Amino acid sequence: MRISVYVPFLVSALLTLPAPRLARRLAPRPAAWALACIAIVTAAGWTGSLALLAFTGVAQIPQVAAEGHWSVRALRAQDPVHLTVAAGGALLLAVSLVLLAVTAVRHVRQVARARRECARLPGDTELAVLDDDAPLAFALAGAPGRIVVSRGMLRCLDDDERGALLAHERAHLHAGHHHFQTLWRLTAAVNPLLRPLADAGAFVLERWADEEAAARVGDRTVVARAVGRAALAAAGVSRPSVLAATGGVVPQRVRALLAPPPTRRTLPFVAGALLLTLCSVSLVDAASDSDEMVDSAKRVRCAAHGAATGPTAVTTDHRHRRHDFCRGYRDRDEHQGPHA
């Protein structure tokens, strides 16, 4: 636990620093899934490591040790984590959980608002056309989701560009891109190092929808023209926080569409997978070390109890419970071996 408990922090930094820039150069669909895997594993590693650090401090509280039947002195002698570090881990863990709860509540409200908006939209088909001169086009996730386009936006595009725009928004809905957004928001609330990754993920989702639209339309230039014209028309127009063809860094998206489709690369994904595996293994190793440390402290407590009470009967209910626990613990050790 001396080193392994800190490895998830290091892996988070190593992955979140280059990952956003690298993801913009990779094929968008596998890049989005890679960013999602990075977010899940590093957020779990971050939370697990903070919890283990916090536990080493909480476990030394006499009342907690009494309930857990372990020796505070033995635990303190074996614990490699300074009490200040443990207190800092507990504070960061509390802040992370509070931010996660706040973000989750906000997201639930946004989902409820989106579903109400879907219910109020005219018609019952996937496409809803608003009688509005403001150029708007976005995908509204709901049950089911809707593609919302204003007449003002449709007037800005020709027939081919309209088809490309609708294909882009349809790709957002059919691929469930709002689930990726939710994941990145929640994990960034838990682990602040993941915030740049969440921003990069939003751009990757737009690129994913661009590539899907280009494949459906069959002309990358048409999609690039549709994205550019839609963005120019919507410049300065406020829009809801949703998936839209005018989102992301539009010049980079247009340049990518005017270039050949991105080639698939394996080396970045293999390197990322190795780092994520290292994060997971280190967290499991740290948890195992923590469990062994507590087991050893329990054995010391039971040995001290046996020496203090001897073979005679004990007098209080508390000692009865401790005696029964130690007897069961010794029986377990005899059955499983000394290193169980």
Image: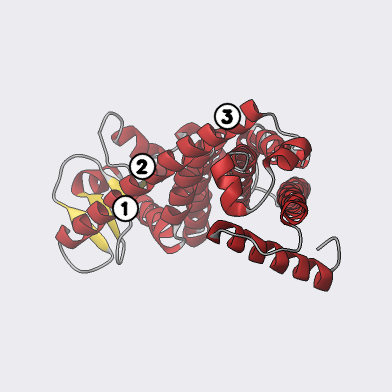
Measuring from the top left, give residue 106's x and y in whole percent. 32, 45
Residue sitting at x 30%, y 54%: 111
Residue sitting at x 28%, y 65%: 126
Q: Mark 3 points at which residue?
A: 88
Residue 259 placement, left or right of 213? right
Kindly report the distance in space between the C-alpha atoms of the residues bearing marks 3 and 2: 21 Å
Quadrant where the image shows the C terminus: bottom right
Residue 102 visible in this rendered orientation of the protein? yes
Residue 320 placement, left or right of 7? left
Q: What residue type is labelled 1?
A: Val
Mark whose residue sits in front, 2 or 1: 2
* Sequence-wise first label, 3 or 2: 3
Label number found at residue 108: 1
Examine the rendered structure and indicate whether residue 86 appears above or below residue 284.
above
Q: Which amino acid does label 2 sit on?
A: Val
Q: Nearer the viewer, residue 290 or 8?
A: 290
Q: Name the residue under label 2.
A: 102
Q: Do the residues labelled 2 and 1 touch (CB within 8 Å)?
A: no
Residue 32 visible in this rendered orientation of the protein? no
Residue 45 placement, left or right of 214? right
Q: Is mark 1 on a helix, strand or loop?
A: helix
| Mark 1 crowdedness (10 Å alpha carbons): few <14, some 14-19, many ≥20 | few
Q: What element carries label 2?
A: helix
Q: Nearer the viewer, residue 72 or 285?
A: 72
Examine the rendered structure and indicate whether residue 328 appears above or below residue 95.
below
Q: Residue pushed farthest right?
A: 338
Q: Is mark 3 on a helix, strand or loop?
A: helix
* Sequence-wise first label, 2 or 1: 2
Residue sitting at x 32%, y 48%: 105
Q: Which of 291 and 51 is in front in this view?
A: 291
Examine the rendered structure and indicate whether residue 115 appears above or below residue 158.
below
Label number found at residue 238: none
